[in-house]
Image (cartoon, coloured by chain):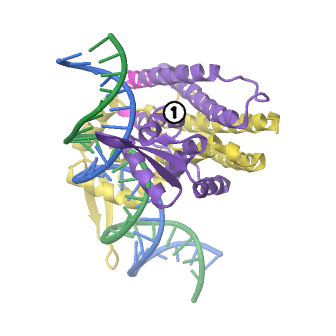
Chain colours: A purple, B yellow, C green, D blue
Amino acid sequence: MALAHAVMSLLAHKAYTGYEIAKEFEGSIGYFWQATHQQIYRELKKLEKQGWVSVEVIPQGKTLDKKVYHLTELGRQNLIEWIDQECELGSIREDILVKIFSGYLVSKNILLQQLEKHRRQHMKKLAVYEDIAKKFDHSPEKLLADELCKYMTLRRGIICEQEWIRWCEESIEMLGNMKG
Amino acid sequence: MALAHAVMSLLAHKAYTGYEIAKEFEGSIGYFWQATHQQIYRELKKLEKQGWVSVEVIPQGKTLDKKVYHLTELGRQNLIEWIDQECELGSIREDILVKIFSGYLVSKNILLQQLEKHRRQHMKKLAVYEDIAKKFDHSPEKLLADELCKYMTLRRGIICEQEWIRWCEESIEMLGNMKG
DNA sequence: GAGATCATGTAACCAGTTACATGATTCA
DNA sequence: TGAATCATGTAACTGGTTACATGATCTC
């Protein structure tokens, strides 16, 4: 159910086209919830049926109409109620850990390569997040509530990347110390 | 494709029944890959069709036969090749972050409750992992390769829980400092 | 005797991914 | 003029979740 709420989260800020929502899922909200444009178009239709969003159709003449989505009052209420409900911990599915788990089947070098590559990927992501963080005024007392909320999710992204890097480095060292 | 490989990872150690594999997905491997017994029975059938696992049927007389699964040489080769292939970063879908993202729509108290609850859940998980870690000899030079591999994935679990707790605490403090 | 655990599965549904498809506009 | 981006979608498939179902054995 949370994709619906992720979409509504965006629409709580402002109206969006499906395309723009898909773009946001590549950045900002995409740092903690991934979705493709196909999923989003499908989800928006469901949300409309339930009356949680409304559509403003902007005719484009020759090509397909542009559709701007708005969060309805019903949708807003639903989102607010959802926030207060109990939530499960997200489920984890990390290829790299499956690889490490059976890493004893392959050579040390292959594992080290995987870890190095992984480390580099997370360094890249971290650099991106830290860049975005610079744009925020870092004193929480000065941030508006909605900016602070965004900033908190960004902090989560930063911490996540830092810890992946820490784990990669630790693991590389452990493998180095390993006999054989 | 990685559920298949997660299952094969287990079978690389020893033969298992579907039920036992499902149990492992609640502990050990379940710390980084979740799957239900329904998924596992379905996956085992696929793996058998592809010749990556073989089944040893143990008749139980009155009730359904017990089925013990073994990794075939083909399966083992496939797993080894998979480990060396490029892998994507796992995708993240965290309800709590969607909630925080639109947290400005609700009262500070509701957010604090969510964060506190989340923190407690991760503290519990951390305690479990740290308990398991105690059973390992902590010097990597002394661990056998397969034990070290398991230990590395466990370390990832521990770091992951620590970072969640760190983020929850940081966020609680930020909310505390917020005006309004 | 009741409840937990062992052990197997089917069916339906929902969510996520991949492939395919169209056409306008913008910029180098 | 060709590539990138804007903007919309359908279809098929795969993977994950929820609900239902059966029956044996073990332990209190």
Q: Residue B123, can we see it?
A: no
Helix, strand or loop at disc 1? helix
| Magenta span of residues | A102-116
Q: Residue at x 44, y 57 (%)?
A: A46
For image coordinates 41% across by 60% down, the residue present is B37
Relative to B61, D18 lies left or right: right
- Front position in the image: A1 or D3: D3
Residue A27 x, y percent position in the rendering:
49, 31
Name the residue type under label 1.
Met
In the foreground, B128 or A164:
A164
Q: Nearer the viewer, residue A37 or B159?
A: A37
The residue pinned by badge 1 equals B152
Q: Position of residue A120 (x, y in %)?
A: 46, 20
The image quarter containing residue B43 is bottom left
Q: Quadrant of the C terminus of chain A?
A: top left
Residue B170 location, quadrant? top right
Q: Residue at x 56, y 34 (%)?
A: B155
**Dominant secondary-structure state across the stretch colored magenta:** helix
Position of residue B128 in the picture relative to residue B65 (left or right):
right
Whether residue A119 is visible to the viewer of this picture, yes or no, is yes
Q: How many marks?
A: 1
Q: Is residue B142 magenta?
A: no
Q: Return the chain for callout 1.
A: B
Q: Percent x, y for residue B69?
A: 31, 55
Residue in the foreground of this view, choosing between A157 and B139: A157
Q: Residues within 10 Å of mark 1 (few under 14, many from 20)?
A: many
Q: Check the image and report above or below for B65 versus A118.
A: below
